[in-house]
Amino acid sequence: MPKCFGSHKSWFAWPAAVSLALLAGVLMTIGCGKKPAAEAVPPTAPVAAIAGQPDPEAELKQLTLALRKYSFEHRHVPASFSELIAAGNLAAVPAAPAGKKFAIEPKAVQVILVNR
């Protein structure tokens, strides 16, 4: 039997190779296109920080960090903030926002804000 267009395996590989090359070319063209300039938006600070009041989110992060450090060093979650203060992990508990208080969530080992 005569072979017309080469071996039968290369006949089926040729369209796949061309399709792959075309797809790569299209994706490169789309990805290299000029992007519109983004508007410069100044970073915003939380409203509480602007007003001179402490930022509760930042305080929660700092308290949680101190709590986790204590828990790692002492191998248990403290029952109260007084243990953190006594161990030197925390100087004092900051004032919470009006109507709220900081509390220790032992399962998640984090500090949360709860209603008074």
Image (tube, rainbow, N blue to C red):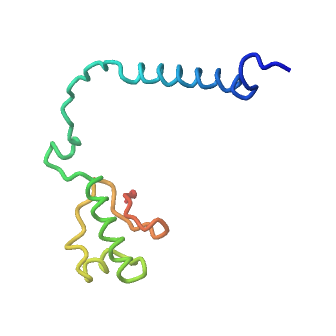
Residue occupying image coordinates x 31% and y 59%: 60
Find residue 44 and report its horizontal and vertical position in percent. Answer: 21, 37
Report whether 90 appears left or right of 10.
left
Residue 4 location, quadrant: top right
Farthest residue toward the left?
52
Residue occupying image coordinates x 20% and y 41%: 45
Residue 10 location, quadrant: top right
81 or 61: nearer the eye? 61
Find residue 115 and report its horizontal and vertical position in percent. Answer: 39, 57
Quadrant in the picture for the C terminus: bottom left
Farthest residue toward the right?
1
Up-down relation of residue 20 to residue 102 (above or below) = above
Report whether 59 appears left or right of 105.
left
Up-down relation of residue 53 to residue 6 (above or below) = below
Quadrant in the picture for the N terminus: top right
Number of marks: 0
Find residue 65 and report its horizontal and vertical position in percent. Answer: 31, 66
Up-down relation of residue 32 to residue 112 (above or below) = above
Report whether 59 appears left or right of 15.
left
Farthest residue toward the top?
4
Up-down relation of residue 9 to residue 36 (above or below) = below
Find residue 6 and report its horizontal and vertical position in percent. Answer: 71, 22
41 or 104: nearer the eye? 41
95 or 106: nearer the eye? 106
Residue 12 location, quadrant: top right
Residue occupying image coordinates x 26% and y 23%: 38
